[in-house]
Amino acid sequence: MSVDDRSGSDVKKPESIRDILRERGLGVDVLVATAMELYVPHPGVETRDLAEEVFLRELELALSDPNLCLLLYSAVLLEDAGLRRELPDLPASAYEEDLNYLLADEVLGGVIATYIAGHKGGFEYARFDRSKPGVLRELGPFMDDAIAGLIGGVSSNMYTRGMRH
């Protein structure tokens, strides 16, 4: 199939990354609940209610960036390929067992977090990746890191920008 053949009008384009994540059980409510499991009161986000409000605002801002959406979508595609046992140059067991030598998932999560919030986001990603709160325990190797990166980056911005308001 040529590139031109794949661009036909019968190809359904996903509406948004929010829809794609929601279809996988990763709606905004699930992301907020997961983030709040590691919430720590800070200046500007002293209460959980305020933290949820600021987190939602930061999440919406992050998800308005098409580059971030494409990074998240790449994790979706990798996860799907892993489930189908179609990851190139990788035995199926590497996906199923989330082997230590498989680093692409960690790199993707780290890139997402630092893209959103710089090095502070990277540190927050590590905290979520290590603890695996909420839905992160249930996700496959690519999605758990991508979502940990998303939540870590957004949480970092929540704490940073919360102090400014």
Image (cartoon, rainbow, N blue to C red):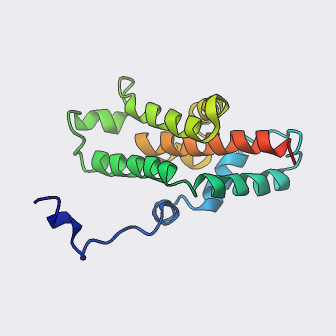
- Residue 107 visible (yes or no): yes
Please state if 13 lies on the left or on the right of 116 as rendered.
left
The picture quadrant where one finds residue 116 is: top right
Residue 70, percent across and down? 43, 51
Q: Position of residue 48 (x, y in %)?
A: 83, 51
Which of the 4 image quadrants contains residue 39?
top right
Residue drawn at 53 percent across, 43 percent down = 137
Q: Quadrant of the N terminus?
A: bottom left
Residue occupying the point 58% across, 58% down: 64
Decide which of 129, 161 is in the foreground and name it: 161
Q: Residue furthest bottom?
A: 10
Q: How many marks?
A: 0
From this view, report whether residue 125 is shown above or below residue 71.
Answer: above
Q: Quadrant of residue 98?
A: top left
- The foreground one among 157 and 82 is 157
- Left or right: 83 as drawn, with respect to 143: left
**Residue lying furthest top:** 101
Q: Give the residue at the far front of this rendering.
A: 4
Vertical relation: 104 (above or below) 153: above
Question: Is residue 140 in sight in this rendering?
Answer: no
Q: Residue at x 72, y 52 (%)?
A: 55
> Residue at horizontal 36%, vertical 47%?
79
Q: Nearer the viewer, residue 58 or 136?
A: 58
Residue 31, image x and y in percent? 62, 54
